[in-house]
Image (cartoon, rainbow, N blue to C red):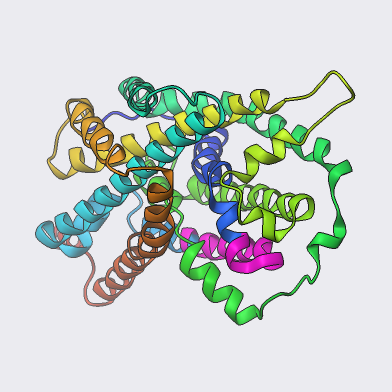
Amino acid sequence: MIREGKFGFAETFSLLFISNIYRMFLTVPAYAVEQGKTTGWLLILLGTLNGVLVFWMITLLMKRHANKTLVEATEEILGPYLGTVVNIFFSLYFINVLFIVHRSYSEAILTTALPQTPISAVLTIFILGAIISCYYGLEAMARVARVSVTFILLGLLILFVSLLPRVDIDFLFPIWSMGLGEAWFLAGKHHSGFSEGLLAALIVQAAGGWQNIRKAGVTAILVGGFFLMMVVLFAISIFGTRSVTEILLPFFDLSQTIKLGRFFQRLEAVFLLTWAMVGFIKIAVSLYAATVIMARIFRLKDYRPLLWIMAVLSYNLAILPPDMASATAIENNYLLTWGLVTTALLPALLLVVSVWRKKGGGMPDEQDQKSS
């Protein structure tokens, strides 16, 4: 059995919250405005509500298999062979998240702070940090996330307050630039693919059970969605929709506009620390999830021997896109859309089959207990 440690609500919330908000520092705000114009904030809101519903569904699945993680529950529901195939899909999904976030954050750091640095150097720093974090284990990452989340929230609040004098409300009109049905469709297709439900189902034993991950996860998704929606609203109200769609990293450009008097300018360097914290933790969590799934599939007692394999795979995949535009296109056109198959449809299928097998005579473990 893989030892993951134990931690409580605060650590679980921090880990899932940081895993959720990485999107606000990349191109997702600009992508939402490009799709929804002045209604871009609504796409984020509806996507967040969809994410909460999917997360709730996954906790219902874990409630039915209270003493197991997602990997064991999948094999129990579908059997050892089909269950292994589905678990491999879960691992491949996290590998995709890992290499896309790995490349996107590296490109963002190059664009904003280190323009003369080779991309390979930044990729190496990020993946080495993730390997070290995973080596110390899930509990260590959760406790680091709990410490980091205070600075992250403080940085975001300072940013929002500092931006208030630059807001132009006129840029937010017309408030409804599209119908609710069209907005819900776009939100469901492009902004509802949250990996936090699968992540929570993997760490459910260390986090104290399905009740704890339900409270922490729903709170994390709602709070994370609120902050992302605020970034979109500030971007629209300060730059206007046409300018936002031409900006690669709206969060960074927002931080560049802050000027406190004549002396306190160019404060974006301060917010890069918040940016880096989120990036390191998100990459580490994704590497951990992909590795632990494979370790549980192969019944390994320790996942650490697989860390280097997954890290090298992520590095090689992350370096393949020729530029940031290509990496962003992969995320927007494939991960955000087709990721729903892994994050929502497969868990829904597992829940339906679990309920059906329960009505048909119970799961295998329950039949054995009744016969004994």
Horizontal side of 323 relative to 273 (left or right) equals: left
In the rendered view, would you say 190 is above or below 176? above
Q: Relative to residue 67, is residue 364 drawn left or right? A: left
Q: Residue at the spot x=67%, y=77% of the render?
A: 178
Vertical placement of 321 versus 78: above or below? above
Q: Is residue 51 magenta?
A: yes
Confirm whether residue 321 shows in the render.
yes
Q: Position of residue 33 (x, y in %)?
A: 63, 61
Counting labels gives 0
Picture quarter with the N terminus: top left
Residue farthest left in this picture: 81
x, y percent for residue 346 = 31, 65
In the picture, measured across the screen, residue 8 lies left or right of residue 223, that is left
| Residues rendered magenta in the picture | 33-55
Residue farthest front in this picture: 116
User: Residue 371: image x %, image y %?
Assistant: 14, 62
The reply to whether the magenta stretch includes residue 35 is yes
Q: Work out which quarter of the rendered image holds the C terminus and state it.
A: bottom left
Left or right: where does residue 217 sit relative to residue 283?
Answer: right
Q: Nearer the viewer, residue 66 or 327?
A: 327
Magenta: main secondary structure: helix
Residue 202 picture location, percent across and down: 34, 44
Q: Residue at x 57, y 51 (%)?
A: 221
**Front-lying residue, 20 or 30:** 30
Nearest the camera: 9 or 242? Answer: 242
Q: Is residue 329 above or below residue 2?
A: below
The image quarter in which residue 363 lies: bottom left
Observer able to see residue 365:
no
